[in-house]
Amino acid sequence: MNKNELQHRSKDFSHSCVKLCMVLPKTILGKHIQGQLIRSSTSVAANYRAACIAQTKAGFISKLSIVIEEADECSFWLEFIMDENLLPKEKVTPLFTESQELTAIFFSSRKTARKNNK
């Protein structure tokens, strides 16, 4: 997967998370998760985009570390939605899987970048 494809994939993930958030219950918990998941999912796409234009390898690695943390946080919130039965699992599971796949991809990219940085 090249840089442009991954930028598109991470942006699609963000859009899908935002759409999921719009149907969360309008409870205190639902609103809290809505804010957290919107923030973390949009951060994945925005920070990956920033990583792609980093001026140094160290800058790339640093931004990618943020992307990994945010993608993993998305996994947490999506899992929490399922744990609390806030939405049907079949609506959440595909996004949960995607968040885990993105985390693994970005983790692997960071590992490769670190190896090539030595």
Image: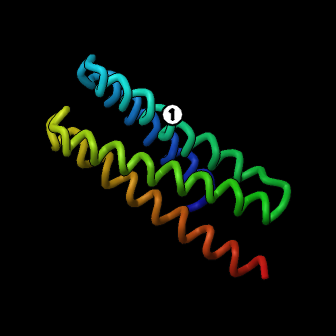
Q: Nearer the viewer, residue 43 or 27?
A: 27
The residue that appears at 68% across and 54% down in the rendered structure is: 63
- Pick out the residue farthest to the top: 26
| Badge 1 element | helix
Q: Residue at x 27, y 25 (%)?
A: 24
14 left or right, relative to 49 = left
Location of residue 38 in the rendering, given as x and y in whole percent from the top left corner? 45, 32
Quadrant of the snapshot with the C terminus: bottom right
Left or right, 35 with reference to 57: left
- Image quarter of residue 44: top right
Residues packed near mark 1 inside 10 Å, few (<14), some (14 to 19) or many (20 plus): some
Q: Position of residue 49 (x, y in %)?
A: 66, 45
Q: Is residue 61 left or right of residue 108?
A: right
Q: Residue at x 37, y 50 (%)?
A: 75
Q: Position of residue 70 (x, y in %)?
A: 52, 48
Q: Residue furthest right?
A: 55
Name the residue that disc number 1 marks. Answer: 39
| Residue in the image at 35% along x and 43% along y | 77
Q: Amino acid at mark 1?
A: Arg
Asked whether 66 or 53 is in front, the reply is 66
| Residue 26 percent across, percent down from the top left | 27, 17
